[in-house]
Amino acid sequence: MSLLTLVILAAIAALAFAAYNYFVIKKMDEGTERMQEIAAAIRTGADAFIRYEYKVLIGICIVVAIVLGVVVSWQAGCCFVIGAIMSGCAGWFGMKSATYSNVRVSNEARKTKSLGSTLKVAFRGGSVMGLCVGGFALLGIFIVYIVFGKLLGQLSMDSMVLTHNWMGIEFVPFTMSISSYALGCSMIAMFNRVGGGIYTKAADMGADLVGKTEAHIPEDDPRNPATIADNVGDNVGDVAGLGSDLLESYVGAISSAVILAIHLFLSSEAKGQGMTTEVLEKLFFYPVLFVAIGLIACIIGIAYLLFKKVSDKPHRELNIATWLSAVLTVIGGLVLSVLFFKDTDLTGTGFALGVYSPWLAATLGIVSGIIIGAIAEYYTSYDYKPTKLIAEASKEGAALTITQGLSVGMISCMAPLIVLGVAIAVSYFCCGMFGVAMAAAGMLSFVSTTVSVDTYGPISDNAGGIAEMSGLDEEVREITDKLDSVG
């Protein structure tokens, strides 16, 4: 029980920080009457979309929960509902923050003409989504551990056996509960990411075809009626959809590590390798504690950017916040591993490097995540050659633009695949499949910071649209475009 205190403290701290940033954003000035009018239209459209989507989702989730409760167990149905609620809340609150932040970013750029101060407003708005992803995910896991694991006894050693329900389906009770929680998160993620994503791209393409192709007017021109729909799409797809999607991945990585720990124990028993129940109990908690440390590190990384004097180099500032979160997670994870597994008989675990094995696997995930992020930046930022080649090709017409863009996209996949392959192989050497799961958990352990950076992009994009439709100075649009391109 005392171990899980760290988890709930991390979750509460993240959600409290998210609430603080949300109310700070809401207190800021929205700018001119025209800016407020446009922002209200975007907000109304985003609210209408997600309310309708969630209305449909509630009915589907109720049906799936009932089916799980009947076919598997009532505990599985309840955990599914918890997962759906947590994922839905993260998407809702993150999107609400984005719809309030966009106009504040435009107004900050209008008033200060400062890239650094505008970056801070956009990042603060994005941090609400990032912190909600980590906070709600861990809050749900804490509830599953306490209610179903502890109070209902699913984490007791007597329950670490295959059981049969009335239909003859075999499962380990706790692994089914945490899997159902992850399934609930996945259900919301699927609708938010796919539904919101299709809406986003349809609105974006429609606005571009009507405006730039047919009417030959600038992007986000107020004469284009599809512009509001395009800006609404940024919020429902690139904010709510992205957040729910990464929350699902985050929970899935944690769940896989816990499930593989139980598989490792059952396999050790079957082969007579001597893995103890004490080690199994520690393997239950290690992935959750590791990501809790990662969430605390993210809070520090996000706060570092928000409470310091920010320069006019957004790339540098965002990278520092990300790297700080990652480094603190690595250091905290090392301390956890040494203290957690010292004086523990690791027989039967397959830990090749003793107490450092799961930490090293998770660190490989963190490092590979940062490397993949750097590779993505190289292939997508206008500061580097790949995008400049695409821009150059566009001078020759649509055909060369498409082929050049497609070739760059294909080439960009190679390096991340190599990085992932190396990380999987080395983490497997460290501690088998549990190590691979810990590498995935490590890669997502500082997800709150990465989602904050990702969400700040569409907020800046919306801010640019508001600036254009409000007739603000060109310098304002230049600032928001710069921030958008970095995001």
Image (tube, rainbow, N blue to C red):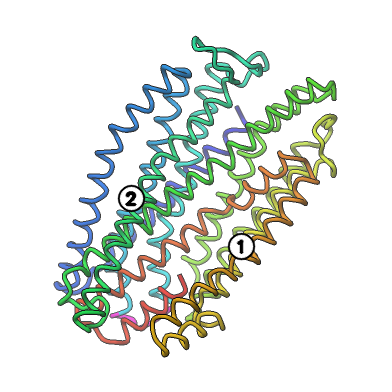
Q: Nearer the viewer, residue 246 or 390?
A: 390
Q: Answer few, some or many: residues within 10 Å of disc 2's Cα (few below 14, many 20 plus, some between 14 and 19).
A: some
Instruction: Tell me, for residue 195, which label it has, or none.
Output: 2
Q: Residue at x 37, y 36 (%)?
A: 85
Residue 328 picture location, percent across and down: 65, 56
Overall secondary structure of the magenta stretch?
helix
When the figure is inspected, residue 415 is found, relative to residue 15, above or below; the finding is below
Q: Residue at x 73, y 47 (%)?
A: 359
Quadrant of the rendered image containing residue 366: bottom right
Asked if the residue at tag 1 contacts the one at tag 2, i.e. Cβ–Cβ closer than 8 Å, the answer is no
Residue on which disc 1 sits: 324
Q: Which residue type does callout 1 highlight?
A: Leu
When the figure is inspected, residue 42 is found, relative to residue 434, above or below; the finding is below
Sequence-wise, the earlier of marks 2 and 1 is 2
Residue 205 picture location, percent across and down: 29, 68
Q: Residue at x 57, y 23 (%)?
A: 174
Q: Nearer the viewer, residue 292 or 272?
A: 272
When the figure is inspected, residue 179 is found, relative to residue 336, above or below; the finding is above
Q: Is residue 97 left or right of residue 348?
A: left
Q: Which residues are magenta?
A: 110-115
Residue 347 picture location, percent across and down: 85, 30
Q: Residue at x 27, y 44 (%)?
A: 53
